[in-house]
Image: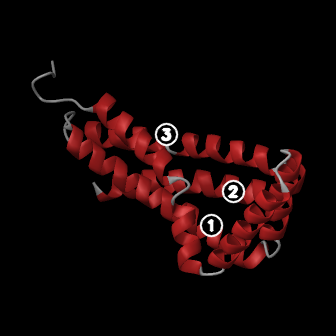
Amino acid sequence: MRKTILTFGLISGAISSLMMVLTLPFVDRIRFDRAEIIGYVTLVLSFLMVFFGIRSYRDNVAGGTIGFVQAFKVGLLITLISCACYVLTWEILYFNFLPDFWDKYAAVVAQQIKASGANPAAMQAQLEQMERFRELYRNPLINAAMTFIEPFPVGLIITLISSIVLRRSSERRI
């Protein structure tokens, strides 16, 4: 079980991490909204490894049968490894290579708020909230926790779906 989980978890994490490394340096040219779409599409693609990992475990380790709970456990562990890779990559990039990330992001958000026609008080409140987030992100543990929240729900949903689709009891085998 350990080999399957590590293999598929690391492959999934490598996919999402590689895409992050390839897109973040160009976020100015790509634009933040497009980069966000690219990021989430990449996460979905990387979490397809959860499906393949559960299937590999079922077919090669569990003798062709797997219940929902065991499938969910395998998928969740793959997801956790993938998310850990994602967080580690972000932490390295953010603290070592993206010193002006929040300045750029805050400028984009300010521009969006202004374009939405928000009143000055609402705009100021949003900018103050952005400043609070900037302060929170300076703490590596909070930064890691907030970063973990990005991919985990996607992985959890794919784990749930994969566990339902791939479960197979010994009674149903031919």
Q: Residue at x 77, y 69 (%)?
A: 102
Residue 6 horizontal/vertical position (percent): 40, 58
What residue did someone put label 3 on? 48
At x 70% / y 78%, what residue is drawn?
Answer: 95
Q: Give how far apart the Cα atoms at labels 1 and 2 are.
A: 8 Å
Q: Is residue 164 above or below residue 22?
A: above
- Dots 3, 2 in contact, CB < 8 A: no
Q: Is residue 161 visible?
A: yes
Q: Secondary structure at mark 3?
A: helix
Q: Which mark is residue 20?
A: 2
The kind of secondary structure element at disc 1 is helix
Whether residue 84 sits left or right of residue 76 in the image: it is right
Q: Are marks 1 and 2 in contact (CB under 8 Å)?
A: yes
Give the residue type that dot 2 points to: Met
What's the amino acid at mark 3?
A: Leu
From the image, tell me which residue sits under label 1: 89
Residue type at mark 1 is Thr
Dividing the image into 4 quarters, which one contains the N terminus? bottom left
